[in-house]
Image (cartoon, coloured by chain):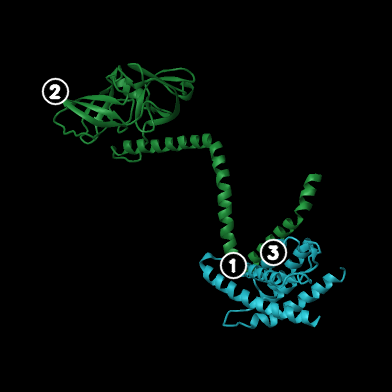
Amino acid sequence: MQWILGFILRYKNLFLYLFFVAVTLFFSYYQSEYHKSKLFKASIFVTGKTSEPIKKLNSYFKLKKINTQLVEENLYLKSLVIDKSYNSKLEDKNNDSPFRLIPGYVIKNDISSSRNIIVINKGSSDMVKKEMGVIGSKGVVGIVNQTTEKFSSVLSILHKDIKINAKHKKSNSFGSLFWEGNSPDKVTLTDISIINKIDIGDTIVTGGMSTYFPEGIPVGKVIEIESDGIYYSLMVELINNMTNLDNVYIIENINKSEINSLYK
Amino acid sequence: MNQYYPKVFLLSLFLIFLQVLIFDRINLFGFMNPSIYIIVLIIHRYDLDQFNYIVVGFLLGFIMDVLSQSAGSHSLSCVTISFLRPLINKFSLGPNYEDFSSPFSDGILTSNKVLYCFLITIIHQIILNAYSYFNWTHTFVILKLTIANSIFTFIVIVSVLNLFTTKE
């Protein structure tokens, strides 16, 4: 305390000067509109410069909350896209789509074996069931295989035993998509008839013929075309980077049991 | 000492009224007006506390601002002069200026006195004009006014001080 008093007394002239400068600025602020606007601009500049690092620090600590908000927002937007895609095929545009999204987070992801499994942090307590489709931020990820109360295992699209119904977006021609077990960013689409015109760079999307995925979820782009005279065999580069998956969305089809009962 | 500050007060009032009623209306060449009220700051004694000197400087400038409807430019320039005077003294009169009681004591060289007066005048004018315009785009006008008014003020102040000392 004595040290502070000593400091103030030592620099009393400086403090008095600064005090009078502050009084002068205050006086200017109320006396002249011109000075008021100039001082206001200066104060905005100073406030902006000083509050920017604090704001950055605060936003760093809020990242988790912001991330959660973004996932919720993405969930809503993806639902809208799926609803719109579903309704575009129907005459009655006000039908609700049978697809619901459940957000999840990848906690284990393999790409090294020929039968890769992904583990996500949502299980039966979150209404996740077997054979639900899973999509990532850009496109298809896999299909739910097993569930526990809190976790689920997902057969990755990079699993040799999984086949997904997919179609060529331009021509609507259907085929089977599977992974040959080589590169983690390339899958093969077969059984597309050569009567359809297909070019390099064309988009491949989900076909909607299965109950796992709604129609039109992006899968990848054609990078190589081969044919055996009857069918094409297309090499497709995946749109989702399967090596760094974070947030995923599990797709629930509420009509699934009804559709499956027709096959029995 | 007890009678010094009332004298300063009366002299300040007198010079402020002279400034507002006469010297602010000269408008030589359309824009030059001398600021003679800073005589109060120039002739202030050295052997008194600088704290009081800063208060005197602020009050002088503040009264000028109120009477001439300016937005704090006189206050800022006067209080800055009051704060910076030890530096100005050292620069113009040398490090031993505290041996003298006032800037016009016998023993101080005339050239030093002239430098001292001119420094106070020009610093006062720079701050006064810069704060009045408060805009970088008017730098040329600020420089022009500062140089012209400093020279005019300097001539008037030196003349007035010479008259005063001659009378003594």
Rounded to the nearest whole Å, what is the CA distance between mark 2 and mark 3? 96 Å
Q: Would you call the spot at circle 1 few (<14 residues within 10 Å), some (14-19), or many (20 or more)?
A: many
Q: What x and y, as percent, mark residue B40?
A: 75, 72
- Picture quarter with the C terminus of chain A: top left
Residue at (60, 66) in percent of width and height: A35
Q: Which chain is green?
A: A
Name the one closer to the observer, A202 or A80: A202
Q: What x and y, as percent, mark residue B144?
A: 55, 73
- The reply to whether residue B35 is visible in this rendering is yes
Instruction: Give the letter of the chain under mark 3.
Output: B
Contact check, label 1 and label 3, Cβ < 8 Å? no
Tell me the residue that label 1 is attached to: B130
Q: Secondary structure at mark 2?
A: loop
From the viewer's perspective, is the residue at label 2 or at label 1 nearer? 1
Name the one closer to the observer, B27 or A55: B27
Q: Indicate which disc residue A228 carries.
A: 2
Write down the colour of chain B.
cyan
The type of residue carrying mark 2 is Asp
Contact check, label 2 and label 3, Cβ < 8 Å? no
Quadrant of res A113? top left
From the viewer's perspective, is the residue at label 2 or at label 3 nearer? 3
Tell me the residue that label 3 is attached to: B88
Residue extending farthest to the right is: B2
Is A13 above or below relative to A35? above
Q: What x and y, as percent, mark residue A224?
A: 21, 29
The type of residue carrying mark 3 is Ile
Q: Secondary structure at mark 3?
A: helix
